[in-house]
Image (spheres, rainbow, N blue to C red):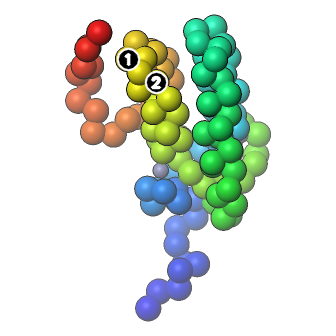
Amino acid sequence: MRSKFDTTKGECLLCSDAITNPICHNCLESEIEDWLSDRLPRLVPKLKKTGEMFKSYTHPGTNCILCGNNMNVCTHCYCYEVNKLFENYPRLAEEFIEFFNFELRGSTKTLDLEI
Ligand SMILES: [Zn+2]
Ligand SMILES: [Zn+2]
């Protein structure tokens, strides 16, 4: 039986994929906040709330290439959560994906325009 500590360094706690682009949710959050305050400032508090959720993951992972802080949830999982904030704002959701261009896996590159 393999030790549970014997896992590859820097894998995401949520999806167990290797974190190939280590940018922590704090750094992403400030980028997204900049973008969001120009568009829908009233969603900013919700964005912060999403960030709070990720702060509870304190398991040692890898280090953010921007701020050097420990991180253990990949950008994909974080953005997936953030994207939920835009459920009722399809245009924002699209722009978000386009703007931050996260490798949203399984994306067929066809955007569902339901506006
Ligand atoms: Zn992940
Ligand atoms: Zn960071």
Give the residue type at disc 1. Answer: Pro
Report if residue 97 is visible in the image.
no
Q: Which residue is mark 2?
A: 86
Q: What residue appears at the point 40 percent right and 34 percent down from the top-left corner?
A: 103
As drawn, 32 above or below 77: above
Mark 2 crowdedness (10 Å alpha carbons): few <14, some 14-19, many ≥20: some
- Tell me the crowding category of disc 1: few under 14, some 14 to 19, or many 20 or more residues within 10 angstroms, Cα based: some
Question: Could you say which is closer to the camera, residue 108 or residue 52?
Answer: 52
Pointers 1 and 2 in contact (C-beta within 8 Å):
yes
User: Residue 90: x and y, percent?
Assistant: 38, 17
Q: Is residue 33 left or right of residue 75?
A: right
Name the amino acid, label 2: Phe
- Image location of residue 21, percent across then percent down: 54, 42
Q: Residue at x 57, y 59 (%)?
A: 10
Q: Would you say residue 82 is visible in this rendering?
A: yes
**33 with respect to 109 (left or right):** right
| Mark 2 Cβ inside 8 Å of ligand 1 | no
**Pointer 1: what residue?**
90
Q: Residue 23: image x %, image y %?
A: 62, 40
Screen quadrant of the C terminus: top left
- In three-dimensional space, the C-alpha distance between marks 1 and 2, rounded to whole angstroms, equals 6 Å
Tell me which corner region of the image, top left, top right, bottom left or bottom right, holds residue 35. Answer: top right
- The quadrant holding residue 25 is top right
**What number is the disc on residue 19?**
none
Beta carbon of the mark 1 residue lies under 8 A of ligand 1: no
Q: How many numbered badges does the structure rendering display?
A: 2
Residue at screen point 52% across, 33% down:
82
Secondary structure of residue under mark 1: helix
Q: Quadrant of the N terminus?
A: bottom left
Numbered disc 2: secondary structure:
helix
In percent of width and height, residue 72 lies at: 60, 55
Residue drawn 76% across the image and 40% down it: 67
